Amino acid sequence: MPAVSKGDGMRGLAVFISDIRNCKSKEAEIKRINKELANIRSKFKGDKALDGYSKKKYVCKLLFIFLLGHDIDFGHMEAVNLLSSNKYTEKQIGYLFISVLVNSNSELIRLINNAIKNDLSSRNPTFMCLALHCIANVGSREMAEAFAGEIPRILVAGDTMDSVKQSAALCLLRLYRTSPDLVLMGEWTSRVVHLLNDQHMGVVTAAISLITCLSQKNPEEFKTCVSLAVSRLSRIVSSASTDLQDYTYYFVPAPWLSCKLLRLLQCYPPPEDGAVKGRLVECLETILNKAQEPPKSKKVQHSNAKNAILFEAIALIIHYDSEPNLLVRACNQLGQFLQHRETNLRYLALESMCTLASSEFSHEAVKTHIETVINALKTERDVSVRQRAADLLYAMCDRSNAKQIVAEMLSYLETADYSIREEMVLKVAILAEKYAVDYSWYVDTILNLIRIAGDYVSEEVWYRVIQIVINRDDVQGYAAKTVFEALQAPACHENMVKVGGYILGEFGNLIAGDPRSSPLVQFNLLHSKFHLCSVPTRALLLSAYIKFINLFPETKPTIQEVLRCDSQIRNSDVELQQRAVEYLKLSSIASTDVLATVLEEMPPFPERESSILAKLKKKKGPGAVSGNELEEGKREGGELNGAGERPGDSSAIGASNAVRLHIPTHSLNYDIIYPPPPLFQSTPSPSADLLGLRSAAPVSAAPPSAGSLLVDVFSEAGPAAPAAGANDDGFLRFVCKNNGVLFENQLLQIGVKSEYRQNLGRMYLFYGNKTSVQFVNFTTTLKPVDPLVEGGAQVQQVINIECLTVFSDAPLLNIKFRYGGALQNLTLKLPVAINKFFQPTEMSSHDFFQRWKQLSQPQQEAQKIFKANHAMDTEVLKAKLLGLGTALLEKVDPNPDNFVCAGVIQTKAQQVGCLLRLEPNAQAQVHTHFPVRALGLESRPLGVSSVTTLSLCVSVVHHSFICNKCL
Amino acid sequence: MIGGLFIYNHKGEVLISRVYRDDIGRNAVDAFRVNVIHARQQVRSPVTNIARTSFFHVKRSNIWLAAVTKQNVNAAMVFEFLYKMCDVMTAYFGKISEENIKNNFVLIYELLDEILDFGYPQNSETGALKTFITQQGIKSQLQTKEEQSQITSQVTGQIGWRREGIKYRRNELFLDVLESVNLLMSPQGQVLSAHVSGRVVMKSYLSGMPECKFGMNDKIVIDKQGKGGTTDEAGKSSGKQSIAIDDCTFHQCVRLSKFDSERSISFIPPDGEYELMRYRTTKDIILPFRVIPLVREVGRTKLEVKVVIKSNFKPSLLAQKIEVRIPTPLNTSGVQVICMKGKAKYKASENAIVWKIKRMAGMKESQISAEIELLPTNDKKKWARPPISMNFEVPFAPSGLKVRYLKVFEPKLNYSDHDVIKWVRYIGRSGIYETRC
């Protein structure tokens, strides 16, 4: 670096800065700055040209003023002039000004780029470095466009100085991060990889950052770097601490480079070449050995550097997960750190052990440290370390030690920090469920959990215990008994009351034989908690009461008395009041048979992924928002508590106000649940990808295989490739189908899974990023999702749908995101048509025609005659009509060619019965007329014209037939 | 009520901190410093709410006075108190500056103890305070019991602002009518808004307990008298000169009941200087100066400005300290000024041309022209053209207020109204006197 000569001191600048610093008030400062600005303006305006020194000085002053927070709108030209100076200091100030203040001003950018180009092509390394630094500092797209082609050439040129090479590598890295599409390595790839062999350690260190970043995106192209990296690493590891002179840091040879090399290797699977692998294993062993050596220095920097390498090495070992010997050694090494007096080391050791625990080779080794970890959980001073200890306990838990670990966690829970309690509770709940040998232990554990940390028990936990109790006959009696006992405590948590209410309501009869828990005693016990509970719990309790009436007819008068009292039947809360009124009526009017049917024991829940597990995964995700839990809880509540369907916040969208969408935030970032592409991760994925989008993801242009893969999943979609772009087509295909690909283009694929019951429905939308670049600002009109969608990742969104009344237009879904800077905007129709709310009805031929004739008035009838787009095939037609949601009535119509259907459209406001007849024209050829005639009957006419409904039905049917990709 | 009072210097260091109530914690001091004094964005509102605590502040030169409260107090009361506090401090040690506050540290705490009690404002009359808070150290030994009881009876008595037994050889009375004119005028000379805020300040050196009566050309009074039987002619002539007062406030010595019923201002004056009343008028204002601007943009790099000022009052009167401030664009790189009268200069630090004239008689006119050179900038933003502002001082009341009489009655002592020497002075100053260009 050229020495700063005395004349470059810039006294004027120093005086100005000290003036500013001495200002007593803001006003004084502004005055001084105004004065200086006026001075600079007059100088720049002046007719005689300024010399380089004063230009530099004034530009410096402007920069200083700008950094103080004032706007600078002139002086750019002078700064650009400085760039062409031959003096280092002047050039430097010019570049500084440009990189701080430049904006995409067209004319100036051209000049600046010119100056940079000149400097890049000069032979002066200092100037080249300055130019490269400026490019990297600005790092804009314009810069990338102008120089992305030039820099790789400088980077690999044989005659480039080492310092310039370093700058070039880092500059390229920066440009690649901002606009990856513009930085095309192509021909340079192999030469860049060979920079790993460079003599100069600095160049290697800089290049390896670049290579790591590039190889994460294009692992195949950079595959050759593995062997080079291994040899480089082995050279460093085996070198003595004195060999590398400048690059030895506190007796550790090149720690940064080693860490980076190890991290680069983590992008690839274990090398296949035996020799390379042997060498690498040797290196890793050496690193592990070195950790055992006595420290060469007492300085903390020495141990930090050493441990940094060690932890990277362990991370690599875990990543490979194929060397049992190394894994066990790593585990033992970490075990030593568990008791180290350095808190950071303990934290890191616990964190790494968590991953080690999931490997089959080292799981046993990890388990030997259980006592230490439990001890850490209890005595550790730092909460984050305790958190890691809890994570590790969770990870190392298996069938053999589950009881011990769960007991320890439960006992710790009483004193645990508030910040980690909720997570602990979830973990205990999951472990208890996962490793439960006998379910009575499970019930005990969970009830204990609720007792100890009731506030932190989220809804999912108690839903889950109820699901399990209902699904397992063998624990029901035990659960009822335990719950009954738990409820006898004078103060019990509301969640306990909920569980108690639910379980006693379902299975109270199992313990009613005991006089200590006779029906009345049970009821009184529950009712004694009633007034202490919140409204949702009270609602649940009311449902439990009505179930009691069914289970124990002798409690009927007491319960009716309770329901009849003013505080229930006139409750200000509409939900409670309605329940009280309805239950009271139900109990007094209905016969025991009816009661028994209505209040039948809940059917077993379908087995699926534990909702708690999903919640825990979400909690760990980067986009986890605690607000989500509440809403999700609501949804689950509706699901479990059959009588308590409560519409939450609704947001009707699109043209139709008839469909109400509940959107629980279930947007899991699938990066967490499904591991990134297999190259980067060798552990088997815990759950299968729902749509199989993953496997097609890294390819930028959609290959036909992606289509067929999806077809496999959705069975009958046919060999035709999914329509790209045309959503109308996509929409029509969904008339008779519930699952499939709604939309697909080069960037994005949207999959849909939906299910409908009566007037309710739930739709899962899967947004799959097909590119390798992340989408930024990803938003949909429905509900906030994680704004970042990683390349190849999939985001899920759940929408609850309620059909309020008959509607014609499908709600619109608008999706916006940024892909590589360009804003993408998509508007799609959500595949919701009125026929989704059809309930099939079976009826006899006689019934059918009787009703058909009754509904002969013009407003009760609609019909349409249309041309079929394709050949008529009876089986296809049948499948379509069934897909429509109606019941296909066989042998009803005298004409065997005709198809007859019946169904009821369920909306919140009303139920509309529909009879439908499809009369294909006799000549069943390609051009066939399909007169469709439909009749409707309204069970409860509520003001919506039936004609509208019917014509809607007909048009939907029509759509389903003109779309040849329906099935 | 006020929970505490802090005084800061310009750096935000606490000079005085007096907490009256427990609900104000120590961190309140820092909260104000961080959120107001050191705020990144300049705080403009005089009331700031931080964490359910209200901070009322006024700034005197570089000194910040902040009153703090957690309760919902009358903000006007708090500010009135803060202004009073400033007056009191000025009366004790002159200008409020960091230096003076540091030097009078003990005195200020003593004053704060006296004028605020548990957050409730007490007697803040300078004259009264000066009788028992003195700067000469402990005086109690020198004070006689009689004097002490006299002070007590004065401070706690009905006429807290004046003590008994004052004697002057010459009974004298000074009355100043101080007004400030505020104006905003369009470039075409249309008045967009104008008002006068005035004060009547008195200095009285009178013996005994005199009763004073002050009369001015208030429209309501004149009209009433007109109806009360004076001749039509008199009514007309006086009606012309009467003024409509929009609102006014009085010193505590004025008997408000009498003002309400008879609209007469009668009072027993405090000894020394005080502000008798404040008022505001908006109608029939005499605008002492008219500013006629002319701005012409010549290309992108040049601006020509011509400003004419016309004085609009009796030629016999002389306006003083005239200053016209013409804002210049932010990219000014050079200015040439020519003016007939006074001196004009481009002040870069204020981004303005300042034109000063010492004296100017009524019904005259003067002119300045300037050529402003501009530096072309990258921004396409147009210059906002701030208004031209003006400062001056004229020897009459722009509101048209006239003092009709000031009568003094002292029944106990043997001097009459005629024996009192009375001085009346009118000063009209500019407030915010702006013309758009």
Image (spheres, coloured by chain):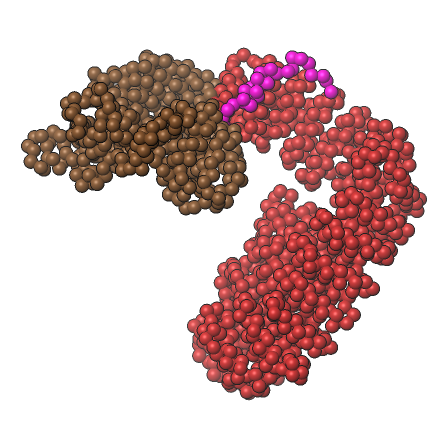
Chain colours: A red, B brown
Q: Is A357 left, or right, of A860 in this rendering?
A: right
Residue nearest the viewer, comparing B435 with A861 = B435
Q: Position of residue A3 (x, y in %)?
A: 72, 16
Residue B163 higher or lower than A456, as above or below? above
Residue nearest the viewer, comparing A679 with A303 = A303
Residue A299 higher or lower than A438, as above or below? above
Q: Is residue B322 visible?
A: yes
Residue nearest the viewer, comparing A583 with B254 = B254
Quadrant where the N terminus of chain A is found in the figure: top right
Q: Is A686 left, or right, of A557 in this rendering?
A: right
Q: Is B75 left, or right, of A909 in this rendering?
A: left
- What main secondary structure does the magenta stretch of the protein show? helix
Q: Is residue A2 magenta?
A: yes
Q: Position of residue A237 (x, y in %)?
A: 88, 37
Q: Position of residue A891 (x, y in %)?
A: 61, 84
Residue A529 higher or lower than A237, as above or below? below
Q: Residue at x 45, y 45 (%)?
A: B70
Q: Residue at x 83, y 28 (%)?
A: A246
Q: Residue at x 76, y 60 (%)?
A: A408
Please tell me in which quadrant of the rendered image residue B153 appears.
top left
Q: Residue at x 25, y 26 (%)?
A: B166
Please tell me in which quadrant of the rendered image residue A441 appears.
bottom right
Residue nearest the viewer, comparing A269 with A235 = A235
Quadrant where the C terminus of chain A is found in the figure: bottom right
Q: Position of residue A87 (x, y in %)?
A: 68, 17
Q: Is residue B131 magenta?
A: no
Please tell me in which quadrant of the rendered image residue B236 appears.
top left
What range of the chain is rendered magenta?
A1-26
